[in-house]
């Protein structure tokens, strides 16, 4: 038996500060149409796919950045994307900055079914970077100033005939993100990212960005018997070079499709959700082999505790 989903990973090239939302949405629609022509059921767009990666600048008054956030979804400017997707009968996953009516700011990703309904919303749990302005940096990574870490955790939703979970960028580096979804029987994990190649706290990691990106998503996929779709906003955005290398990873941990460019680029893979069971019913049969009674430290403590 097979349960196929044809998935498009819609990598974006840079979005500069002066690019309008309308221009960006029209790029998303182009990729959506390409994906439809390629027979995709679902297209995955990156983290913060509607704007430049604005946490690279610090402003004293956060409300000056309100224009980067969406207060509703679909919003008037994103409605054409929703309309086109519904017309084509193709689902999508979209990352954006969310400003709630209560004034909370989240780094958010939604999953939209083929009929245009929003079936799931995920808000980023692991927020990297710094809270305060760090004037000596070449560029800021002030995500912790611009976004509240979500306490909602990692859900798994029934959509596209599969069990689908989401995570955003830095979440992919943490094994707990995958495992919490793995324990809910996840079969497909969707992850958008913006990863600057220059890591200011430790530049020796710069050359390893691509390796680490693949390492975490391939191991997360394999250790949880799940498909993982990682999609970048890539290229040189406002002078900051960001990693591409978007990829679709099988439950075996193998990369089945990978971006060749750092521009707008669509990767397509035919993904059999039943392939997950080759792993979840054998080597990673959690019910048979896991030992949660000896893992209690994982939820009991946050940082390292020395004797
Ligand atoms: N967007 C995001 O989470 N980026 C981080 C960059 C490293 S922390 C400065 C990432 O994990 O790729």
Image: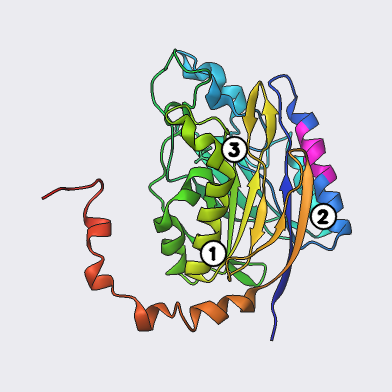
Report the residue that reaches farthest toward the right: 37
Q: Secondary structure at mark 2?
A: helix
Mark 2 touches mark 1? (CB < 8 Å): no
Q: Secondary structure at mark 3?
A: loop
Q: In the image, which disc is placed on residue 194?
A: 3
Majority secondary structure in the magenta region = helix
Sequence-first disc among 3 and 2: 2
| Relative depth, front residue between 304 and 50 | 304
Q: Is residue 76 above or below residue 170?
A: above
| Relative depth, front residue between 13 and 84 | 13
Q: Residue at x 56, y 38 (%)?
A: 207
Q: Is residue 48 above or below residue 161?
A: above
Q: In the image, which disc is placed on residue 264?
A: none
Q: Does the magenta portion include 28?
A: yes
Disc 2 target residue: 35
Residue 60 placed where, x, y %? 45, 13
Left or right, 62 with respect to 44, comes to left
Residue 96 placed where, x, y %? 60, 38
Sequence-first disc among 3 and 1: 3
* Residue 99 seen in render: no
């Amino acid at each position: 038996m097979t349960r196929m989903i044809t998935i498009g990973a819609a990598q974006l090239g840079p979005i500069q500060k002066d690019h309008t939302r309308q221009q960006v949405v029209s790029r998303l629609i182009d990729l959506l149409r390409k994906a439809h022509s390629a027979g995709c059921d679902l297209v995955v767009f990156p983290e913060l796919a509607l704007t430049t990666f604005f946490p690279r600048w610090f402003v004293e008054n956060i409300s000056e950045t309100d224009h980067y956030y969406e207060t509703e979804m679909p919003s008037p400017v994103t409605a054409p994307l929703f309309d086109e997707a519904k017309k084509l009968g193709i689902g999508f996953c979209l990352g954006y900055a969310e400003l709630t009516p209560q004034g909370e700011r989240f780094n958010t990703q939604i999953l939209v079914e083929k009929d245009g309904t929003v079936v799931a919303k995920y808000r980023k749990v692991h927020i990297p970077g710094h809270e305060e302005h760090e004037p000596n940096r070449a560029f800021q990574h002030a995500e912790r100033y611009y976004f509240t870490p979500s306490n909602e955790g990692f859900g798994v939703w029934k959509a596209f005939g599969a069990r689908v979970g989401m995570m955003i960028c830095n979440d992919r580096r943490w094994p707990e993100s995958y495992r919490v979804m793995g324990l809910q029987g996840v079969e497909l994990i969707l992850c958008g990212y913006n990863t600057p190649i220059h890591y200011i706290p430790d530049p020796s990691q710069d050359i390893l960005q691509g390796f680490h990106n693949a390492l975490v998503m391939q191991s997360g996929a394999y250790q949880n018997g799940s498909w993982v779709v990682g999609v970048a906003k890539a290229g040189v955005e406002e002078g900051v070079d960001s990693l591409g290398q978007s990829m679709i990873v099988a439950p075996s941990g193998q990369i089945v499709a990978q971006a060749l460019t750092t521009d707008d680029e669509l990767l397509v893979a035919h993904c059999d959700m039943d392939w997950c069971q080759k792993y979840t019913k054998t080597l990673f049969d959690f019910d048979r082999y896991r030992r949660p009674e000896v893992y209690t430290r994982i939820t009991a403590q946050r940082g390292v505790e020395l004797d």
